[in-house]
Amino acid sequence: MESVTLQVLRYLPEEKSEPFYQDYDVPFQKKWVILDALNYIKDHVDGTLTYRWSCRMGVCGSCGMMVNDQPVLTCETFLETYLPGPIRIAPLSYFAVIRDLVVNTDDFLGKVKRAKPWLITDELKPVTEGEYRQTPDELKEYKQYSMCINCMLCYSACPIVGLDPEFVGPAAVALAQRYNYDSRDDGHGQRNKILMDDDGIYSCTLVGECSVVCPKAVDPAGAIQRYKVTGAVEWWKSVVMPWKSDK
Amino acid sequence: MDSRESTTSRTDDAGVEIPYQRFRPKRYQPRMSIFWWIHKKVYLRFIIRELTSVFVAIYAVILIVKLNALLRGPESWEVMTAALATPFSIVLHVIILLFVVYHSITWFLLAPTATVVRLGRKRIPDSAIIAVNFLMWLVLSVAVGWIILAV
Amino acid sequence: MTRYGPDEHDVLIVGGGGAGLRAAIAVAEANPKLKIAVISKVYPMRSHTVSAEGGSAAVIKSNDSLDEHAYDTISGSDWLCDQNAVEEFVNEAPKELLQLEHWGCPWSREPDGSISVRSFGGMKIKRTWYAADKTGFHMLHTLFQTTMKYDRIHRYDEYFVTSLMVDDGRCQGVVAIELTTGKINAIAARSVILCTGGCGRVFPYTTNANIKSGDGMALAYRAGVPMKDMEFVQYHPTGLPFTGILITEAARAEGGYLLNKDGYRYLQDYDLGKPEPKPVLRSMELGPRDRLSQAFEKEHEKGQTIEGPFGPFVHLDIKHLGEDVINEKIPFVRELCLKYENIDPVKEYIPVRPVVHYMMGGIHTDIHGATPLEGLYAAGEAACVSINGANRLGSNSLTECLVFGARAGKAAAENASQGKSFSRNLEAIAMDEGRRIEKAYLSNRSGKTKNSESIVTIREEMHQAMKDGAGIFRTEKSLKESQNAIQELQDRLLRTSIGDTSYTFNTELTSAMELSYMLDVAEAVIQSALKRDESRGSHQRSDHPGRDDDKFLVHSLAYKTEKDLPRIDYLPVTITRWPPGERIYGR
Ligand SMILES: Cc1cc2nc3c(=O)[nH]c(=O)nc-3n(C[C@H](O)[C@H](O)[C@H](O)COP(=O)(O)OP(=O)(O)OC[C@H]3O[C@@H](n4cnc5c(N)ncnc54)[C@H](O)[C@@H]3O)c2cc1C
Ligand code: SF4
Ligand code: FES
């Protein structure tokens, strides 16, 4: 059988203080994605290799890794694409590594939370009064930004995230925009303050790679640019008409 | 109780690393090299785009100097134009022109990410937004050129 | 190594899927003073609810009624559900889905801005709310993002629960491994709600995610709580052959056809109605899942399926819907086919076959989500209330997660509000658990290697046994053989010792523990199936065809025994207004 070499960047905090590459040969199968190859290693070669996965259908966002320097979801990236190999597999860039291919997710979730990704309404409508009306066109306004699976690939594509670890980052802004453009939401004022802060959207210098690597076509770069425009308008408004600016 | 205390990397006061302590794994925080932008083509292109803005800035400064010379009267204007006619200055201007053109092109190509325009129910495709930008650029350039040449 | 610290909560929810997060919010809203925590072995937004595609059922349109929804559910269940539970369920379903709408869920809409509904298998009227074909994804993210605004909901992300702490006749918390550090923690709580989802991974081919290993079911089972109706395992008729990835029922609801190797809509031969060009509710491709999966098996016996490298399959044809409908209504179907089968369903047939999808059975609870063990509650797929009986209708389970998640949350909050104090023993219990884990799995740490069995081999043999013995059609013989195999594997698992002795993110350890959970679940599934000498819904016994209401209009309850096979008890089914009748589809 044909085989492919996977060069996996491993990190074992209990043994070594630095990561190191380890080579594994796996049989090549046309139907296999990178994740299948990793599972093969875990089951048949080396049970200590550590990584996250769950849904194996590109929707839970667990399995992001760097494959040949490019952040991808390994459950939807075929081995075949990288023939003849060797294929380099490393944990997502810029994140702190816990072990092998497992990176710290907490900082990312903290940033998401900073963007207040929940519906904020001025007046609470009781559930008994039925649904908020929202036309298909209104839905379309934000739908794209609601498709984010929190896979963090965009963070690993963004050098600004690497240079400024506090930068709120692409997905968090996309999620803020997901609610800002929702016809049911009145919270943009609250989100504005946070996103216009230091480490907010103006840290972004428009490298644009986040949108290229996003597996769900969320276009976080677009979300940020649109926010910059809105942000600038808001700022001018607050200068010209300070009495009208959002609290 | 302890999920929060166990996660940061540890070195002692002298900066020497402490070996693994049970339940306190050290996290590996990769550091970015100063040459991070060399390894990937997209990053390199991005850095070049960022650098071109330096030339845009230089040209802006030259413009201010020119204005200043104009205000100070015909004498300084003479000195100014003489300086502008030197080969060095011409080469500089050619370089600036190239970079400014590069900057404008990349900028217009990025324009659609910031602008979502709708006509009725359909979102205007990115290519159309780019095209409109280039068209406006062309029209303005021709108009400016015409004014200059006509005067 | 095990520590018992000040980690005390009023309500602890195990599981951050749809049911768990809904329960957490319900507790937060029920009593603002309670200390709440959600513990989950994966970050909540990775939970399996994220994969649900088709939709969530609730009566909202004026042409529909609660009774119709109840009747569809009850007949779909082959009359094995508790009708009082179903009545509560259909009644609260619309409120729950509307609540989710008010939290921001991007439901698909009609042109006038009202909620849009689609048809689903076994439902006589269109009542399935959907968010394109990523309904579970949107529901889960909406819930997760909404929980973020409650600072009172503490999260233990990536903590793996290994046992329940039971003392003084009540459940008082859990013991869990913090994955990133390996520390074993005792987390005390006055009420514990198990929302750990299903157990599809007990079988080889499943739509379920890797994390669905029946952990919560086994935890409760080990604590003496019975598992109800475990013999009822739902096969979904349309999974992709190699990966088992689900092609949602919505593909058929929008008008897809199932074709055998001759391009013939074979369902018409199985009393499911006449083929019409447009989808007809409760007929043909929109029949219930058990009947469709059984029809596939029969068709296979007749030699009319297509042989592939991963077993037999048939074709799902959605070409005639056209690119626009596919992109608008079921874009994820197209995405999955393109990505995993390299097929464009706009132009080609999709190969599909039945795969294990959902567990009707689960932890025995009453209609408030309470188990027989004081302080322990359960909701979602892990629980069995039961509204699903012998066969769940598609799109009822997401709604179930919300309705019974919220109910369990309220009941658990009420229980916790009594403020009972914790036993002194908890620390000792936790220490014992730490020693058990060390001894059972990590003897390599002390260099005392046993003649090691590989967990991979055991898992593969378990899959084989479940596939052979407890598939779509079962016999006494096949079940007995499988039970023997599972019992042997249980013994062999005691002799494993895993190679990875690390404390940090030891996934080999968690896999081994998941395997032990799965074997427990497997023995209960088989034993319950063995004792039910009839065919009902998804449980088809070739040696006992036909339903036997005299003897088996009852729920099975499987109790764990010390060394022996599980003990099976029975509990009568609650009937309110719909006496058992014939299940009629397409007529
Ligand atoms: C592919 C697919 C499509 C589906 N589509 C539909 C549909 O269209 N409509 C519908 O109604 N239903 C559908 N279902 C069914 C439905 O999605 C599930 O029944 C439902 O999501 C289960 O939710 P849950 O909250 O009970 O569990 P899950 O979402 O599975 O969550 C389980 C949680 O428990 C945690 N957990 C488990 N074990 C442990 C442990 N040992 N320690 C700590 N935490 C633990 C996990 O981390 C996770 O957070 C579908 C199912 C599948 C597989
Ligand atoms: S925006 Fe895209 S790349 Fe970034 S986390 Fe969301 S889905 Fe992943
Ligand atoms: S495993 Fe879920 S996205 Fe890859």
Image (cartoon, rainbow, N blue to C red):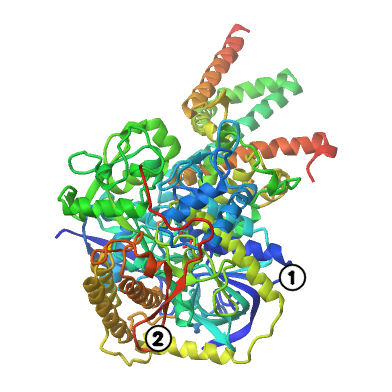
> Are callouts 2 and 1 both on one chain?
yes
Q: Quadrant of residue A112?
A: bottom right
x and y percent of residue C531 in the render? 33, 74
x and y percent of residue A81 in the render? 28, 49
| A230 vs C39: above or below | above
Q: Chain of mark 2?
A: C
Circle 2: residue type: Thr
Label at residue C561: 2
Q: Nearer the viewer, residue C456 or A124?
A: A124
Q: Is residue C548 left or right of residue C579?
A: left
Q: Nearer the viewer, residue C586 or C245?
A: C586
The mark that comes first in sequence, 2 or 1, is 1
Circle 1: residue type: Lys
Name, please, the residue furthest toward the top: B150
* SS at circle 1: loop
Residue at 57% x, 41% y is A223
Residue at 43% x, 69% y is C554
Q: Chain of mark 1?
A: C
x and y percent of residue A215 in the render? 43, 47
Q: Is residue C422 visible?
A: yes
Residue at 69% x, 47% y is A128
The residue to which callout 1 is attached is C33
Label 2 packing within 10 angstroms: few (<14), some (14-19), many (20+): few
* SS at circle 2: loop
Q: Nearer the viewer, residue C379 or A191?
A: C379
Residue at 36% x, 31% y is C322
Label at residue C144: none
x and y percent of residue A129 in the render? 70, 44
